[in-house]
């Protein structure tokens, strides 16, 4: 009979049952509220305590609710606009930080990280005070009512974009650029034909990330939004304060779904770019 | 950057006075600030206790399991903070699912006892009293842990991943047990990850205001709530910005301490090597 050789090393903590159980309990607790939330968005009961059967009427209700639709379209407009602007700013910042050495560059690096590190509430408040200080006009026309939120979002999102793209750019060999220039490419051509194709996976990933961050953000939006620029998270917040209702569950489920899809694609693009680099 | 403007507002209104900062350091506000720091410290500590075993398990499991676990920890990070806090309410409130489950448990236990004619002795209480899980400090700390624990797991996992497994084997070979290996070999190696995890958890905890607002009660207000109130309902902007600037100072001090610490650490390490 063939004897099975079992390699047992004390280092293999994956076999440790205590760790296994702790991780399992942790994951259950992590997902229980979210799954509960999604499940009860289909519950046919107003008070949402006991399961009363499947229904999708709260989703239908959502699409009839005009206020929610307005908030949703506001959120989408803000997310798309600030994604475009912050991606552009992020690219330029990343290229500048990667390619050039300038005065106080070290401190610029730190300054770039600052909006990410400080508590979100401080960011929101500083935006509020800033807009107030420069007397930012209170627009009444629709797309312009969102301008202050867009500016606020861009200012905390573009550092994320810049950091991701810079990490990607740091993989690029300088020799390739020099070769391109040797072969007669102009500066503009080098950027268009070498740098942009090289960083495109990171570009897509960071754009999706920016979109998620903007769509998700509550704190900064809460302080910069006015009465006619309500976004989806702000709307949800004002609904939550009145208590629990299945409608909130339904809209939260939709938001989670959008964000999961975006994140999935972002992760796929990022891992793809890393894999290409490994080759 | 938009930061320079902020002091100017105070400047215009109060001509560089420190009245607002003085106000922030006495009475109710100081107590709240102190309490927020305590709550954040407790949260950070508990996060650490949860994160180390989970990070351990992830970093030692096989590649397939590892990627699944990592994604499942990252995914809630991307869902909205507000939604996740809201989803906790449904579980924790007095008529929420946890209390419901406990009540069912109580009833079935009572039913079981009645078989043995013991129900009248009230071994497990006269009737079920729901646990008050909402609107107190417990719910705030629970919510904070629930939201911020992934921020602790990921840095610890990243440094655990870098530790050479042979070092651990060598430690066991030389006769150390699990405990000694953990404290003498693993802890010094993951201390960098732990410090960045602590920073990543502590700073947002200190500034959080949705979680205490939605889960907390009257006695579990945090500094974030007070700041928010200064800007929304109390309408005392200079004081609110003074408070939030105190938060920023705390953040900067923590980061500075970390910087000095890492400098000292690397210097000590170099001396040890040479």
Image (spheres, coloured by chain):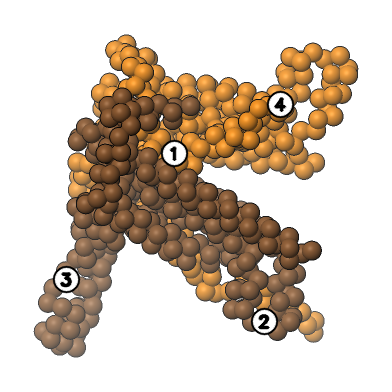
Chain colours: A orange, B brown
Tag 4–tag 3 contact (CB < 8 Å): no
Q: Which mark is residue A257?
A: 1
Label 3 residue SS: loop
Front-most of A44 and B266?
A: B266
Q: Which residue is mark 3?
A: B128
4 or 1: tag closer to the N-terminus: 4
Residue A259 left/right relative to A165: left
Residue A68 left/right relative to A127: left
Label 2 residue SS: loop
Q: Are marks 3 and 1 on the same chain?
A: no
Q: CA distance from mark 1 to mark 2?
A: 49 Å
Q: Is residue B44 above or below residue A59?
A: below
Residue at 80 percent of width and 33 percent of height? A173
Q: Which residue is mark 4?
A: A100
**Badge 4: chain ID:** A
**Badge 2: chain ID:** B
Q: Are marks 2 and 4 on the same chain?
A: no
Measured as percent of width and height from the top left, residue B101 is found at 27, 65
Observer-side mark, 1 or 2, equals 2
Q: Is residue B92 above or below residue A254?
A: below
Observer-side mark, 4 or 3, equals 4
């Amino acid at each position: 009979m063939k004897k099975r050789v079992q390699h047992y090393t004390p280092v293999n903590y994956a076999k440790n049952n205590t760790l296994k159980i702790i991780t399992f309990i942790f994951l259950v607790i992590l997902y229980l509220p979210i799954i509960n939330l999604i499940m009860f968005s289909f519950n046919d009961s107003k008070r949402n305590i006991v399961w009363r059967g499947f229904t999708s009427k709260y989703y239908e209700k959502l699409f009839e609710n005009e206020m929610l639709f307005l908030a949703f379209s506001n959120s989408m407009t803000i997310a798309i606009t600030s994604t475009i602007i912050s991606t552009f700013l992020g690219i330029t910042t990343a290229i500048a930080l990667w390619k050039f050495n300038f005065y106080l560059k070290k401190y610029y690096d730190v300054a770039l990280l600052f909006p990410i590190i400080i508590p979100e509430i401080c960011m929101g408040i500083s935006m509020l005070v800033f807009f107030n200080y420069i007397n930012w006009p209170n627009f009444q026309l629709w797309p312009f009512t969102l301008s202050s939120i867009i500016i606020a979002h861009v200012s905390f999102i573009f550092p994320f974009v810049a950091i991701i793209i810079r990490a990607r750019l740091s993989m690029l060999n300088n020799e390739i650029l020099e070769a391109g220039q040797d072969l007669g490419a102009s500066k503009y051509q080098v950027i268009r034909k070498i740098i942009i194709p090289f960083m495109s996976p990171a570009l897509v990933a960071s754009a999706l990330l920016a979109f998620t961050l903007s769509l998700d953000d509550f704190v900064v939006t809460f302080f910069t939004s006015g009465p006619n620029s309500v976004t989806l998270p702000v709307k949800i917040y004002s609904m939550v304060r009145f208590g629990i209702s299945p409608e909130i569950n339904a809209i939260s489920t939709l938001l989670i779904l959008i964000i999961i899809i975006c994140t999935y694609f972002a992760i796929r693009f990022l891992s793809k770019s890393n894999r290409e680099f490994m080759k | 950057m938009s930061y320079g403007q902020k002091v100017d507002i105070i400047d215009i209104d109060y001509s560089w006075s420190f009245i607002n900062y003085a106000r922030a350091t006495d009475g109710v506000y100081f107590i709240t600030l102190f309490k927020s720091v305590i709550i954040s410290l407790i949260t950070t500590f508990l996060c650490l206790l949860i994160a180390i075993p989970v990070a351990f398990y992830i970093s030692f499991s096989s590649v397939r399991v590892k990627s699944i676990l990592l994604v499942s920890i990252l995914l809630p990070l991307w869902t909205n903070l507000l939604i996740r806090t809201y989803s906790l309410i449904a579980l924790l409130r007095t008529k929420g699912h946890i209390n419901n489950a406990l009540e069912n448990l109580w009833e079935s236990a009572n039913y079981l006892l009645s078989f043995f004619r013991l129900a009248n002795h009230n071994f497990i209480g006269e009737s079920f009293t729901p646990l008050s899980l909402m609107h107190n400090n417990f719910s705030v700390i629970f919510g904070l842990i629930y939201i911020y624990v992934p921020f602790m797991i990921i840095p610890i996992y990243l440094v655990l991943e870098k530790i050479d497994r042979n070092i651990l084997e060598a430690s066991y070979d030389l006769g150390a047990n699990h405990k000694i290996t953990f404290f003498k070999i693993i802890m010094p190696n993951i201390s960098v990850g732990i410090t960045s995890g602590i920073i990543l958890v502590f700073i947002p905890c200190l500034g959080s205001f949705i979680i205490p607002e939605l889960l907390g009660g009257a006695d579990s207000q945090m500094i974030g709530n007070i700041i928010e109130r200064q800007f929304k309902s109390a309408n005392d902007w200079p004081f609110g910005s003074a408070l939030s600037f105190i938060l920023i100072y705390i953040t900067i001090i923590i980061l500075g301490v970390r910087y000095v610490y890492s400098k000292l650490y690397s210097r000590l390490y170099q001396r040890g090597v040479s």
